[in-house]
Image (spheres, rainbow, N blue to C red):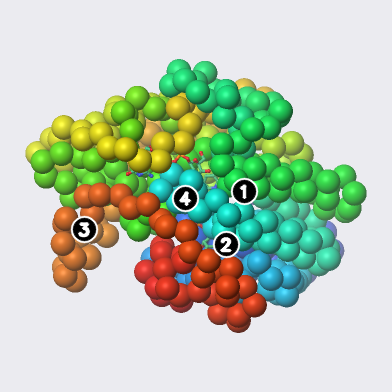
Amino acid sequence: MSSYEQFVIPEKFRKPEGVTGQVKVGIAGGAGFIGSHLGKRLKAAGFYVKVADWVKNEFMQNDEFCDEFHLVDCRRADACDILCKDCLYVLNLAADMGGMGFIESNQSVLMFNNTMITFNVLEAARKAGVKRFFYASSACVYNELVQDTPENPGLKESDAWPAQPQDTYGLEKLYAEEMAKAYQRDFDIQTRIARFHNVYGPHGTWKGGREKAPAAFCRKAIASTGELEMWGDGKQTRSFIFIEDCVDGVLRLLFSDLAEPINLGSDELISMNDFATMIMQFRKDGPLPIKHLEGPLGVRGRNSNNDFIKEKLGWAPSIPVKVGIEKTYRWIESQIEKEVAAGAKMTDYVSSKIVVQSTESLDKLNDAVPPTNGAYPSTNGKH
Ligand code: NAD
Ligand code: GKE
């Protein structure tokens, strides 16, 4: 089955017996990249979408992806109660997250923040009587020892245990998975867990340090002139899933019977050198030489094994990376054009930053408003 055929949510979930009016769905982190795409899709399917996020979406008005927006901090139980009230389904997409320029240099703060979010959203969902719960896990849960060569044959779901994730980001995700599984065993709540493998597409973070390789390479290919900078020797490998496949996969999983964590990723493995070269084909004057720099590298090779998702859902992501990355490139090009017209310089975009850890978000835990000074740089300071 092609992923271009969008999943249609079965009527029994859209109009369940005994529910009058629109079914309410809550999305924690719903102003973020994946959360806002999911909100848009759920709204179009007829759901009433509630979003809780501590920032507003940079690229869309609230009514494009939700019916109700709560500017709140999901590390707080009271905020999560507001989100989950009257919801039949809840999706937790909130996390303090980013690519290699963020997760390696922010190990303590992100672990605290994400643990608080994990606890509070799930417990609020249980208290509110939510029936189905989705948790956004990550390929970062996998044991680093099975990711130490570029020729990764594909990580199977069972490769997560025995556990040795590379960073605290992955360890927290693994713990959160276990918590969701335990809630399902012990309480009247169905939990669904997907391990995303590097999701990319329009509206994703593309600058500031939290962006991942797809957006960073597009941005640099657009702005660079002599050479394109890259962390590492470029022989490290990954697979990348386009946002449309990701949204479709989340909905297929949420409304399925599959209660075990599954990979939600592409199995199209590519080296960073080949990926950057592919992206540079979209430049008017062709590819540039690659300049390799020291930087945070992550694992040596990571790929998704999709046997389990095919067996259980009869579907797997299939949008070729070349197709998805061209759409992403064109979108980033339009963002750069806008910023340059407003006074930015092309040279602002040729290097990637590493986000330095700050305790600002910890210090503001009990404040009514989220931190504003760049603790969440994807907002450009807008709240
Ligand atoms: P994102 O940063 O665009 O979205 C996360 C959202 O969570 C943001 O809007 C952010 O403001 C919000 N958030 C963070 N802390 C919050 C808090 N305390 N209270 C309220 N909102 C808060 O990232 P994304 O790419 O959309 O990722 C969504 C989820 O998927 C995250 O859980 C992430 O860890 C997971 N994931 C993403 C990828 C990927 O490649 N994008 C890969 C693996 C896992
Ligand atoms: N971000 C980024 N920016 N990465 C670069 C850059 C750059 O400018 N130049 C080279 N790279 C290299 C990184 O060093 C890494 O080896 C590879 O590209 C991929 O980096 P990434 O996209 O930032 O993130 P990873 O795939 O290593 O890890 C991400 O995995 C996801 C799950 O698959 C995590 O950071 C999480 O965002 C997420 O859980």
Instruction: State how far apart marks 1 and 3 are (Cα).
Output: 32 Å
Q: CA distance from mark 4 to mark 2?
A: 22 Å
Image quadrant where residue 95 sits: bottom right
**Hey, what amino acid is under mark 2?**
Gly
Please name whichever residue, 86 or 138, is drawn nearer the observer in this view of the structure: 138
Query: How would you rate the neighbour count of disc 4 (Cα within 10 Å): few for under 14, some for 14-19, many for 20 or more?
Result: some
Q: Which mark is residue 105?
A: 4
Residue at 54% x, 75% y is 370
- Tell me if mark 3 has few (under 14), some (14-19) or many (20+) residues whose alpha carbon lies within 10 angstroms of its own: few
Q: Which residue is mark 2?
A: 29
Q: Does 122 sit above or below residue 278?
A: below
Q: Mark 3, mark 2: which one is toward the viewer?
A: 3
Name the residue at 39% across, 27% down.
236
- Closer to the N terminus: mark 1 or mark 3? 1
Q: Quick check: marks 1 and 2 in contact, CB under 8 Å?
A: yes
Q: Earlier in the sequence, mark 3 or mark 2?
A: 2
Q: Under 8 Å from ligand 1: the CB of mark 2?
A: yes
Q: Is residue 67 above or below residue 152?
A: below
Q: Nearer the viewer, mark 1 or mark 3?
A: 3
Residue 36 in the image: state x and y as whole percent: 51, 60
Q: Is mark 1 within 8 Å of ligand 1?
A: yes
User: Gap in Å between the C-alphas at discs 4 and 1?
Assistant: 21 Å
Disc 1 marks which residue?
136
- SS for callout 1: strand
Q: Label 2 neighbourhood size at 10 Å, few (<14), some (14-19), many (20+)?
A: many
Q: Residue at x 47, y 50 (%)?
A: 105
> Which element type, helix, strand or loop, lies under badge 3?
helix
Question: Which label number is shown at residue 61?
Answer: none
Kindly identify the amino acid type of the residue bearing the numbered disc 3. Asp
Q: Earlier in the sequence, mark 4 or mark 2?
A: 2
Q: Earlier in the sequence, mark 4 or mark 3?
A: 4
Task: Identify residue for label 3.
Answer: 348
